[in-house]
Image (cartoon, grey):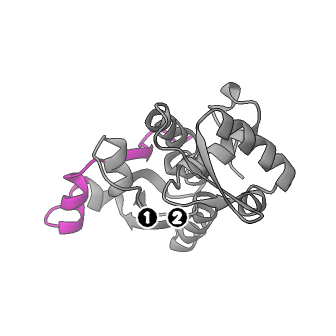
Amino acid sequence: MQGRSRLLPLLRSPLLGELLAWIYLHPETSYSVTELARRLKSSQSTVSREADRLVEAGLVSEERRGNMRLLQADLTSPLARALAEVLALTYGPAAVLADLLPPVDGVDEAYIYGSWAARHAGEAGPPPRDVDVLVVGDADEDDLADVALAAERRLGREVNIHRVSVTTWRSPGGDPFLTSVRSRPLYPIVEHGDRS
């Protein structure tokens, strides 16, 4: 479960935000009410009621297959793009990683790079299948692996964390990886000086 979202004051309940976020941040997939209830740790009847409201509002489409009700983001809605952007900012990788990374000792800076950062910067493309994270500092690799696993559970996507030292980050020299990362959009999660 996600920490308290900044979007929550606009929504009726935390469950509604989590349901919308899961559906809109995985628009390529249809989910049954049963799957969503299990993932969101809620009852099927509660998820079904929320889904009824979202379908009625034109934000979610449904398909019936026998007894199974499948839900998917309705990307034809005029609100779809803006809603997906707001949900990505409040429930997506940046929000999840901003909760998980700052408490880890040795994280001086952290950035999302790759396809998630490119989508945030406005580059067109399909929903990213994974999240690439650059951590600057001397954080323990096992601690970062724990963060990656926790983030994967919350996001439903693979999270790849690459760590570099502060010295390497400040003077990348001829490191082709860092040259490539710096040449593309970066989305800051933890910036130098953000830590208490």
Q: Residue 129 carries which label?
A: 1
**The quadrant where residue 187 appears:** top left
**Percent coordinates x, y for residue 161 in the rendering:** 44, 66
- 67 up-or-down from 23: above or below: below
Which sits earlier in the primary sequence, circle 1 or circle 2?
1
Q: Which residue is drawn at 49% across and 47% down?
A: 94
Is 128 situated left or right of 60 in this image? left
**The quadrant where residue 164 appears:** bottom left
Q: Are marks 1 and 2 in contact (CB under 8 Å)?
A: yes
In three-dimensional space, the C-alpha distance between marks 1 and 2, rounded to whole angstroms, equals: 6 Å
- 126 up-or-down from 191: above or below: below
Is 44 situated left or right of 140 in this image? right
Tell me the kind of residue under disc 1. Arg
**Percent coordinates x, y for residue 139 in the rendering:** 50, 64
Q: Residue 55 carries which label?
A: none
- 42 up-or-down from 12: above or below: below
Question: Which residue is under mark 2?
Answer: 157
Is 56 situated left or right of 124 in this image? right
Tell me the kind of residue under disc 2. Arg
* Residue furthest top in the image: 10
Within 10 Å of the Cα at label 1, are there few (<14), some (14-19), or many (20+) other Cα atoms?
few
- 79 up-or-down from 170: above or below: above
* Residue furthest left in the image: 174
